[in-house]
Amino acid sequence: MNKGLSAKAGGCGRKSLLRAVLLSSALLGAGTVATLPATAAAQTASQPFDIRPQGLPSALTAFSTASGWEVGVAAEVARDVTSPGVSGTMPAEEALRRLLSGTGVTYRMSGARSAVLVRAPSGSLMLDPVTVEGTGERATGPVMGYVARQSAMATKTDTPLIETPQSVSVVTRDQMDAQAVRNLADALNYTSGVMTARNGDASSFGGDGIQVRGFGGDGTTGVSFNEYLDGLRLKGSGYVTSGLDPYLFERVEVLKGPASVLFGQTSPGGLVNMVTKQPSPNARHELVLQAGSDDRYQGAIDIGGDVTPDKRLSYRFAGVLLDSDGQTDFTERRRVAAAPTLTFRPTDDTELTLIALYQNDDFSGSPLNFLPSQGTLTANPNGKLPISFFAGDPNFNSWDRTTASIGYRFQHRFDDTWTVRQNARYLHNDLNYRGLYAGALLADMRTLRRNTFSLDERSWDVTVDNQLQASFDTGPVKHTALFGVDIQRLRSDTLRGLAAAPNLDIFAPVYGLAIPNPPIYQSIATSLSQTGVYLQDQLKLDRLVLVLGGRKDWAESKQRNRLTGATSSQQDDAFTGRVGALYLFDNGVAPYASYSESFEPVTGTSYSGSAFEPTSGQQYEVGVKVQPTGMNSLFTLSAFHLTQQNVTTTDPDHAGFSVQTGEVRSRGIEAEARVSLAEGLNLVAAYTWLDAEVTESNDGNKGNTPVAVPSHTASAWVDHTVQAGPLTGVGGGIGVRYVGSTWGDTANTLKVPSHTLVDAALRYDLSQLNPNLQGVQLAINANNLFDKEYVSACTRATSCYYGQGRTVIGSLRYSW
């Protein structure tokens, strides 16, 4: 199926399956337009067109608005292509021919009023008959530009975002390339409702620390517990689930608010889903070489295409080699990552995609560098610590993590009503970590008491999601019903050691000490299982959209303490529901309201020995989405009230135990805009006001704000590529990010100031200098352009993190 952009009149349209057999025809050489005989069905009455010369993406939008045609095109086909425009009265197909004249791009008819764009080959050839199906953008496919129109994250069905009654943000591959993102935190820097890089430089070394609407992620370790890969949870254990290389992703999606109805045990704030690069109808070939700050050197490759002439078998391979230092002394990183995929289409109605992933991160030093607040955030009479200060020891600190997975996505369409899907993955994680962390800063304000910590974790995770979809009508009501059963099985082994370590004079540090591995204090074998049954119905009556869903989950955990021989087990079950309503006006305005629930099991027992109940979350959300007619854009404004109960707090009557009397409330307003104002000009802007509060607690922090949760965040990025004139091929972007002040401890006595950062990019298409350099682009990106020194967050007095200083990356990109 084609995974390009579907340009539609009115700015949005219904998903369709379009089939046609292409007649054999001669194609002219590259740089010219193929003359294809018009089919009888495609011949329409003449109509007026007035489309000025401009970039191909916006020209196609204007063409589709004027003609009512659907035009599918992959992002790599239309990128940096300028159309000569078209003016006059003529049939739509003739207008499309003229629109493509001299661009090196041609088209294939895929229906009476639909076409797919492809690169025109050099020389002439005859096309074999081909069936083109689903010419619109797909939820797992590439997006041309910054504005995605489809996603399956909120519904598990390929649904237009404008028809989804919940806030969803999609970061496209084009945006990630333009901003030269190095990690998941970078990719989400310009997304509303998301807090990134709370653990500073560790975000670029493997700890994403992503927080959505005030929930999710561990600000101390940087580990995120709300991440998904290709719609399946990255369950993992402990420290081993974060830090996948963003070059392997086609898009990154953020579903905001509870989502247990579809995904089971989840964080109430929302989910982050990374979509692996997968085969697309048009072959993609790209080689990227990078060099930059901190002795960063990276090579990346992305290739794909058809294996067989009948296009039934296609592949894609994305890979990364990275060697880089960090901004902290003694930290070096080497990474090898690869994501091969293979798609087999034995029939037009059956598709199987095999998806594999491998990544190894070998760090000397450590991605985790805990610093005291005195000398970083607050004054220290001995001076200020430099951002390069390392609190560990190069003789001891190390981090070696390997993630490997193999899975598949299977789909078969029986007829226009019934479709069955199965998504499955086996994931193995292996982590060996040795580190020193700060215990306390002594009274002299320069001697840091430290502890050694060792960790060996391995996990084996199997996830299977079975889905049966039915599309049918009951009178005037259109239904997309989904029934699913998903299963997760996790087995993990954890070995942890802890001991006192030599103190460190932070203002006259001595490194290279002989530090032994600490004795083991914990050896745990864990098995977790979850089974969920869910039912969802998306109803559409004219322009009214309703989403109803319910789910029942059963979860069980078992642990065996290898040191003592003791065993424990816990069983939980929960029912969660969801309802949403949206009305889509003719002008592209879509107000909506929704209610959704979440749950998460909590391990452990109370003083009486009773197992803890799962935490529960509820969210009320209202908002409006706007997708103006004829404009490639999406605006979202939402307000929400989110509450999580059964949070564990200190037992006031029994020291060392907990009770479930805690409650956290998060409410706020989010605004986000993703716009293509004109060809070559893209804009992303976001604002979040968040009021988070501990509303119930026995820890003495009732009424306080959770740590590292800002009340205000705002960002804007504008990117432009010159399409005509002497500066053709020159492009660049400028971005500003603001993060408000946060609290650095649960007592709200340590405050981290706000910070504002500026990012920038500049690039040039070298083919403008020499036609022989077609597809070659030079770029330079700078994050934190003015090298602002700041503390990104603290989670306690001895766990503060400097934010990432200025980084500059130069890129040489060759696409063919």
Image: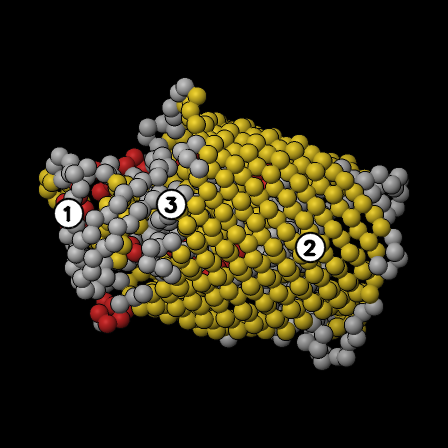
Mark 2 and mark 1 lie on one chain; the one further toward the N terminus is 1
Q: x, y (%) of residue 812?
A: 37, 70
Disc 1 residue type (three-letter): Pro
The image quadrant that residue 475 belongs to is: top left
**First in sequence: mark 3 or mark 2?**
2
Return the disc, 3 or 1, that comes first in the chain's sequence: 1
**Where on the picture, by quarter, is residue 380?**
bottom right
The numbered disc on residue 348 is: 3
Q: Which quadrant would residue 47 be assigned to in this image?
A: top left
Q: How many marks?
A: 3
The residue that mark 1 highlights is 37
Name the one closer to the observer, 570 or 775.
Answer: 570
For the point 78% across and 48% down, the residue is: 558
Q: Position of residue 589 (x, y in %)?
A: 37, 31
> Which is closer to the viewer, label 3 or label 2?
3
Characterize the local packing of mark 1: few (<14), some (14-19) or many (20 or more) Cα atoms within 10 angstroms.
few
Disc 3 to disc 2, how far (Cα)? Answer: 40 Å
Foreground disc of the pair 3, 1: 3
